[in-house]
Amino acid sequence: MANEILEEVIREFILFFNDFYSGHYVIANIMTGFDPMKFDYPDVSDVFHNQIGILQTYLADRLVEPQGRDFRSRTTNFTFNDIAGHVSIITAVDLVHMDSIIGAFNLTKDRE
């Protein structure tokens, strides 16, 4: 039951992430070809943490550039600072919550 819940959380997170940020090429390329259902839950968490870290680095780099500070998406109307704030929430809330579920229930696809 807990595995099914986590799998659904992962699926919904990927859909949300792609829908919300797909207007930005760097993000669209990060998760291309990644199928979380082929990995164990702690491994999926590691991939998410690593990719979010790449995204945070990208945003921090853009925010120190004058054109990055002035950027506003014509599609979403978000600035890089807005996106960085959303990514911080994902890191502080969603990924922490996912990690706590994995840890609390010792979730794994490895049945051995």
Image (spheres, rainbow, N blue to C red):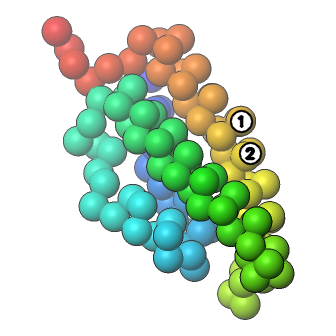
Image coordinates for residue 85, horizontal then vertical, percent: 78, 54
What residue sits 68% from the left and 68% below the top? 62
Image coordinates for residue 102, horizontal then vertical, percent: 47, 21
Q: Which mark is residue 92?
A: 1
Please indicate whether residue 72 sits to the left or right of residue 5 in the image: right
Local packing at callout 1 (Cα closer than 10 Å; few below 14, some 14-19, many 20+) is few
Please indicate whether residue 41 sits to the left or right of residue 92 in the image: left
Q: Is residue 7 visible?
A: no
Are discs 2 and 1 less than 8 Å apart at CB?
yes
Image coordinates for residue 31, horizontal then vertical, percent: 39, 59
Q: Amino acid at mark 1?
A: Ala
Eyeballing the image, is 68 above or below 61?
A: below
Image coordinates for residue 101, horizontal then vertical, percent: 54, 21
Eyeballing the image, is 30 above or below 6?
A: below
Looking at this view, is 83 or 59 the one in front? 59
Q: Which residue is mark 2?
A: 89
Return the residue found at the far front: 65
Looking at this view, is 103 or 81 the one in front? 81
Looking at this view, is 95 or 81 the one in front? 81
Q: Secondary structure at mark 1?
A: helix
Name the image quarter holding residue 76.
Answer: bottom right
What residue sits 57% from the left and 79% below the top? 23
Name the image quarter holding residue 37.
Answer: top left
Name the image quarter holding residue 72.
Answer: bottom right
Q: Amino acid at mark 2?
A: Ile
Spatial distance from mark 2 to mark 1, Cα to Cα?
A: 5 Å
> For the C terminus, which image quadrant?
top left
Q: Is residue 105 visible?
A: yes
Eyeballing the image, is 27 above or below 37?
A: below
What residue sits 29% from the left and 51% below the top? 35
